[in-house]
Image (cartoon, coloured by chain):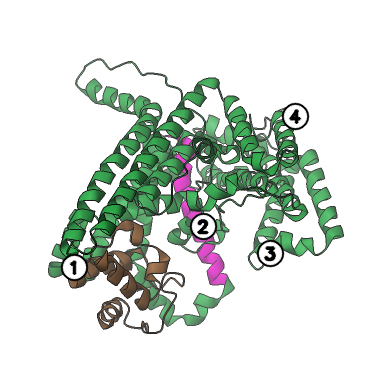
Amino acid sequence: MEKVIEILSELHPDVDFATADGLIDDGVLDSLDIVSLVAEIDTEFGVTVPAEEIIPENFNSAEAIFAMITRLDEE
Amino acid sequence: MLFTSYGFIAFLCILLLVYYIVPKKLQWITLLVGSYVFYAFAGLECLVFILFTTVSAYAISMLTHKAIIKENAYIDANKESLSKEERKAYRARAKKKRFRILLVGLVLNFGVLAVLKYTAFAVNNVNTLVGLFGAEGFSIPSLLLPMGISFYTFQTMGYLIDVYRAKVEPEKNPAKFALFVSFFPQLVQGPISRFSDLGKQLTAPHKFSGKAFTFGLQRILWGYFKKLVIADRVLVAMNTLLDSPDEYKGAYVLLLIILYSVQIYADFTGGIDITIGIAEAMGIKLAENFDRPFSSRSTKEYWRRWHITMGTWFKDYIFLPISVTRPMMKLNKAMAGKFGRVAASKTVAYIASGVTWFLTGLWHGAGWNFIVWGLLNCLIIMVSESLEPTYKKFHDKFPRLMSSAFYGGFMSVRTFMLMGLVRSLDCYRNVGLTFSMWGSMLTFKGMGEILSGGIFKLGLTAADFIIILCGVAVVFAVSKLSARQSVRERLYQRPVVSAVLCGLLFIAVITFGAYGVGYDASQFIYNQF
């Protein structure tokens, strides 16, 4: 989880990712951030995020992103 | 059968009547029969193509789903014995197999669309190329382009991809699936629906609801108002301007850009209002396709609010899959090491955007003007995005300016004009001609002529322009009001006011609708796409 927050903070240092829960809905993360994030997840966690997983529910908070990584890693 | 024809209105009345008279479990069959009757009016031969899409997509969806069930059963049965790596490797192999099945469906259906829609364009280009070497070109085939093929093909292929991704359970009843493909109100110009939103709604029983029915009819009436009072009236002036472009250069191009923006907005949103209204009267909720696009402050925002279902289709099924492909991920990582993460992600996103916008242009039509239109949109978005840090600095320096209504209005007008300018490629249908018209616009030649009465020599009288202006003012007011709360919900609390306003709207459509000598209720612009 800390690692996810660290990656996100590098993208937007001014956002408190520990509490933010509308990253997509509120327009904090745009498509460019998502492309960057997916590449980072692949590098840091060895988890490939397929296109169908790129939905607001999976990227709205650091917690949701971490839950998605854990799920994809287990599948 | 045009939405604006008396035949269609009679067809709709009969269908609505039958829909609510028959037992509820037969409602979806009524819709299926109605949809095929509607489509048959476009030409019996068109039925062959929609049937082909239906049958092939149904078969592929079933095969894909069977493969998913088999995969899951294997994983469940070997949960204990398989290691995590073995499980992942099996999933990857199985997904590849599943993808091959999907690919057959995509190639078959996009293949039919490509042959019918793009053969003449491709042959034309080949002829131009071989002509440079003095060779004789090929004859250009004249192929049938079935009504709505781009819309139903995209909707159905989106469904196949969703089934492949195990996002939706496929429809097992082929007749129910046929209804999803052919649901008649959206065959003309969308919206491009998702099975997860629409599939079950179409086949569920719907009890008559006075509120939903009234709302549906109101929305249909509103659509006719936009289409007949505004769009079809503006069309007369547009035809004059486009029939002799040499005569109407300079300031007339600016006039064309504004008029076409008004026309396409009233035409497309009006058509979608009729579509959504018909569905609503049947108790079916379709996806919204517009969210007050002309109030957008940037091109990016505009494309989130205009033709939303097409935009999200391209994002979900083209942009994102390209962005996360293996080669793109490799490129991203390689570039991140050398040029930094932002530059790497931007490069990947820009390549994916370029492909997406090229295809978006091509989807709109088989012509270089559409391709250039798509790529120009992409370029504007990329440039705006690259300039964002500069904008941010400027906005941080003048925080009060950002929140002022004046600056907001300026940004909206700027976006409106920029999008209108690019959209004029759609009018002139020729890239060279469009660019030369843009060049001539800079001279403002003809401005005096327009202001001294030239505007009334385009086929529309002063009274016509007053009707258009009043119509636009009403649409603008409703759009502003609906930003806060649904206008229809507000009116629902005041039935008398609602009845009076609807009566006035009806009278306006009957009185000011573009009928009679010199007018012809035309097909919707997006029907050709």
Which chain letter goes with mark 1? A
Query: For the point 67% across and 44% down, which residue is it?
Result: B278
Q: Position of residue B428 (x, y in %)?
A: 47, 36
Do marks 2 and 3 share a subunit? Answer: yes
Residue B375 visible in this rendered orientation of the protein: no
| Residue at (27% x, 25% y) in the render | B126
- For discs 4 and 3, the disc positioned in front in the rendered view: 3
Q: Secondary structure at mark 1?
A: loop
Q: Which residue is mark 1?
A: A46
Chain containing mark 2: B
Tell me the residue that label 3 is attached to: B481
What whole-number distance in Å separates the C-alpha atoms at marks 4 and 3? 33 Å
Would residue B163 be counted in the magenta stretch? no
Say few, some or many: other residues with alpha carbon within 10 Å of mark 4 (under 14 / 14 to 19 / 20 or more).
few
Label 2's element? helix
Chain of residue at mark 4:
B
Is the C-beta separation of discs 3 and 1 under 8 Å?
Answer: no
